[in-house]
Image: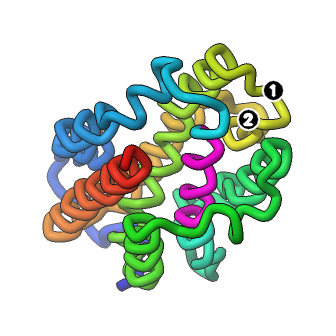
Amino acid sequence: MTIAPPTTPTSAPAATEPLDVAALVRAASADDHRAAESRGFITALMGGQLSLADYTRYLAQFAWVYEALESRGARAGDPDVFDPALARLAAIESDLTALGASDWRETHPALPATAAYATHLRAVADDDVRYLAHHYTRYLGDLSGGQAIAALVARHYGATPDQLAFYAFDLGEDGPVRYKRRYRAAMNALALEPAEVDRLVAEVRESFRLNSAIFEALAA
């Protein structure tokens, strides 16, 4: 299905509090989010217990994920929330080159968990609600926890700015906090029906499960 912009009613309805979809999704997926970020590999990486080579392995797996996420491309009639400026694959490939892995497709093939995530992303690309779930999880995560990841990788492993372009967004006059506020407002402006909100929440939770599976595979 295609997300349609909110329509203007012909007669003014009774005033109601608008549904804060972004807040609802965040609350409903909080446990899944915590479970994903507490996996052994990611906690060890962020705790300085691994190496820059391990971070390169991590980044290369997510290159496959972002390639699949962004293969949908921009489409006519896309809602504002699908902002092409958020695309990360080019930055990831730049980082991998700086990390000595310009041939990442050959040296870091997709793990089965990564391939499953990428396959799922391509399968939901034509379902705007389910695609939005992954768009939200990945890009808002990069604008939030991703900034802390960049700082920790630089501190623990000596990563240089040219190896951390993934986390450097060109947001114009907006900083990450302001941009995230606008992103959530754009989600709410979609005026999703209750059944669509349920699908969105379910898919956000699935995205965290797929993400956790990659962390487990990297640990193995």
Residue 30, image x and y in percent? 22, 37
Q: Does residue 7 show up?
A: no
Q: Outermost residue toward the front? A: 220
Identify the residue at horizontal 51%, vertical 37% (top origin): 180
Report the front residue among 33 and 62.
62
As displayed, is residue 56 above or below residue 105?
A: above
**Does residue 197 appear left or right of residue 64 in this picture?**
left
Residue 212, image x and y in percent? 32, 49
**Does residue 79 appear left or right of residue 14 in this picture?**
right
- Disc 1, SS: loop
Color style of the picture: rainbow
Q: Mark 1 = which residue? A: 160
Identify the residue at horizontal 40%, vertical 68% (top origin): 117
Does the magenta portion include 75? Answer: no
Q: Does residue 175 show up?
A: yes
**Does residue 110 appear left or right of residue 75 in this picture?**
left
Magenta span: 55-66
Report the front residue among 153 and 193.
153
Identify the residue at horizontal 31%, vertical 72% (top origin): 10
Q: Given contact means CB atoms under 8 Å apart, are the residues at marks 1 and 2 in contact? A: yes
User: In which image quadrant can residue 70 be found?
Assistant: bottom right
Q: Mark 2 = which residue? A: 164
Residue 69, image x and y in percent? 54, 68
Residue density around tag 2, few if under 14, some if 14–19, many if 20 or more, within 10 Å: many
**Does residue 95 appear left or right of residue 73 in this picture?**
right
Q: CA distance from mark 1 to mark 2?
A: 7 Å
**Is the N terminus in the top left, top right, bottom left or bottom right quadrant?**
bottom left
Magenta segment's dominant SS is helix
Residue density around tag 1, few if under 14, some if 14–19, many if 20 or more, within 10 Å: some
Q: Amino acid at mark 2?
A: Leu
